[in-house]
């Protein structure tokens, strides 16, 4: 099982509840909430503030292609 992290430890990563952190992105894309469709696709990106993100349960990744 992959290790999970706290939100403050993430440079680029995602949360299974549909959140993403990408500190390399523009300000509007840094912290986002997405709808996860039935086929697993992420859709309808909405910017959120850091304090609305879940504190724990984050996965690190290299980038979002």
Image (cartoon, rainbow, N blue to C red):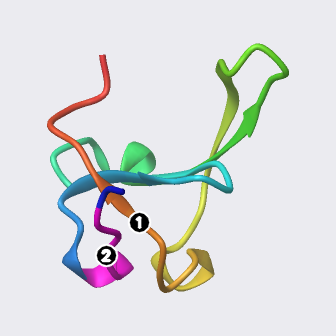
From this view, report whether residue 52 is shown above or below residue 58.
Answer: below
27 lies left or right of 48: left
Would you name the residue on which mark 1 appears?
A: 58
Check disc 2: other Cα within 10 Å, few if <14, some if 14-19, many if 20+. Answer: some
Q: Which residue is denoted by mark 2 in the rendering?
A: 5
Q: CA distance from mark 2 to mark 1?
A: 5 Å
Task: Inspect the magenta stretch and tell me whether residue 53 lies in it.
Answer: no
Whole-percent x, y for residue 41 in the image: 65, 18
Q: Give the main secondary structure of the magenta stretch.
A: loop
The x, y position of residue 12, in whole percent, is: 23, 51
Instruction: List x then y, in percent, for residue 6.
Output: 35, 82
First in sequence: mark 2 vs mark 1: 2
SS for callout 1: loop
Magenta part of the protein: which range? 3-8
Most foreground residue, 10 or 27 = 10
Figure quadrant of residue 52 = bottom right
Residue at image point 21% right, 78% down? 9
The quadrant where residue 34 appears: top right
Q: Residues within 10 Å of mark 1 (few under 14, many from 20)?
A: many
- Picture quarter with the C terminus: top left
Residue 22 seen in the current view:
no
Q: Are marks 2 and 1 in contact (CB under 8 Å)?
A: yes
**Can you give x and y, in whole percent of width and height, for residue 5 in the image?**
31, 75
Q: Residue at x 28, y 66 (%)?
A: 3
């Amino acid at each position: 099982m992959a290790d999970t992290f706290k939100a403050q430890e993430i440079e680029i990563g995602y949360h299974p509840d549909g959140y993403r952190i990408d500190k390399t992105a523009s300000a509007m894309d840094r912290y986002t909430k997405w709808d996860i469709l039935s086929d697993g696709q992420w859709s309808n990106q909405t910017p959120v503030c850091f304090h609305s993100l879940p504190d724990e349960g984050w996965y690190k990744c290299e980038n979002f292609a």
